Amino acid sequence: MSLASRLKRGGAPPLFPTHSKGGMPSIGDRLRSRFGSYGFLAPAAVLVTLFFFIPVVIILVLSFSDLDAANFGTLQWWLPENWSLDNYAKIFNNKFFPKILGNTAFYVVSTLTLFNFSSALIIALLTTHVERRTGFFFRVLWLLPRLTPSVIYIMMWQRIAARAPHGILNQLLVPLGIGTGGNLLQASPWPFVILVNGMIGASFGMVIFTSAIEAIPRDYMMASKVDGASTLQTIRYVILPAIKWPILFVITYQTLSLLTSFEQIMLLTDGGPGLYHTEVWALTAYHRALSNYFGNNQWGYGAAWAVILVIIGVIAASIYMRVFKFDELVEEPKIDLL
């Protein structure tokens, strides 16, 4: 009987193709269904394998070798007999290792605390408690630093911090008797490094938090108001517990992003002024592997810096998941206990 005839007679359509006895799908149908699923997953799997897993393996193997521009083409770095831990020993014996590690920790914690998390959450809370179009307008303004090309964005900040009379900020400070009118990037580079990166990073968390807050049922908000809760109490006891999962995601993602970001720092200060003053771990890995001070690209040594950075990121993410009780956040609701 055809499907149209079954529907006319009030019958339900078959759940499975009835190509075998008993109305169950045949082996060929099941195989076609399974291979069809694999076919849809194949493009993503190929891309992840080519651009993630294989590069990770290459970087890991490369970190145990001494490959650089001098022995490129002669050193068989993929052979185990050419592997050693010399690069890692060289990193921990570097006299600037504590300074670079401290710079990285200060940069990540400061930028994450002041902008990528706190400012993003505050902006999301403010723009979701005002008129919708007004909130949308201010969120668009915060997206502009992320949409602006990096070189133009950094050139703008360099002009702001330039020495008097050309610097925009010095044009305001010098008439008030504040500062000497010198280049502010040379005098106080860290505030600019944090501000430049924070203005970009805040927009990501803002978008995530805004979506999460607007997804909270309005009945919860109204119930808190009826019970006499203030706005701060509503935020603390209703909104923040409801967006605990987005908070974990933003903090984890932004920590890993800050650990690996160096583009803005390289364009703004290139690790200076002076020796390693604003040099962070990712920028050091880039300098060692691709832009060495001595003109010798040390790919193996730079890869070792990158591998340690990955380990630091994994440890940080694991700590976040333990603190936020990741297993409970992803646990299915116990309907039978409700």
Image (cartoon, rainbow, N blue to C red):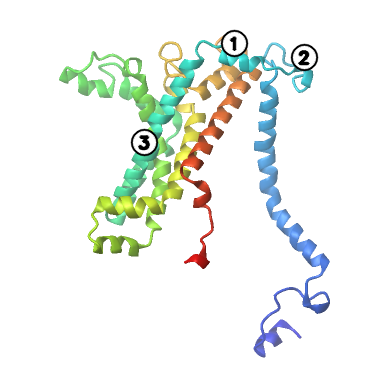
| Kind of residue at disc 3 | Phe
Q: Residues within 10 Å of mark 1 (few under 14, many from 20)?
A: few
* Amino acid, disc 1: Gly
Decide which of tag 1 and tag 2 comes sooner along the chain: 2
Find disc 1 in the rendering and name its residue.
Answer: 295
Q: Choose the circle earlier in sequence order: 3 or 2.
A: 2
Q: Which quadrant is the N terminus positioned in?
A: bottom right
Residue 149: numbered disc? none
**Picture layout, residue 231 above or below residue 226:** above
- C-alpha span from label 1 to label 3: 36 Å
Question: How crowded is the residue under tag 2: few (<14 C-alpha within 10 Å), some, or many (20+)?
Answer: few
Considering every residue shown, the one lying at the far front of the view is 337
Look at the image and tell me whether residue 311 can be seen. yes
The nearer-to-camera label among 1 and 3 is: 3
Q: Quadrant of residue 294?
A: top right
Asked whether disc 1 touches disc 2, contact meaning CB atoms under 8 Å apart, the reply is no
Relative image position of residue 38 (x, y in whole percent): 72, 54
Q: Which mark is residue 115?
A: 3
Q: Which residue is mark 2?
A: 74
Give whichever of 114, 69 is nearer the camera: 114
Q: Earlier in the sequence, mark 1 or mark 3?
A: 3
Q: Are marks 3 and 2 in contact (CB under 8 Å)?
A: no
For the residue pair 142 and 302, the one nearer the viewer reads as 302
Tell me which residue sits at (31%, 24%) in the image. Answer: 160
Q: Residues within 10 Å of mark 3 (few under 14, many from 20)?
A: many
Indicate the secondary structure of the residue bearing disc 2.
Answer: loop
Is 132 on the left or on the right of 151, as rendered? left
Residue drawn at x 41%, y 43% as measured from the top left: 205
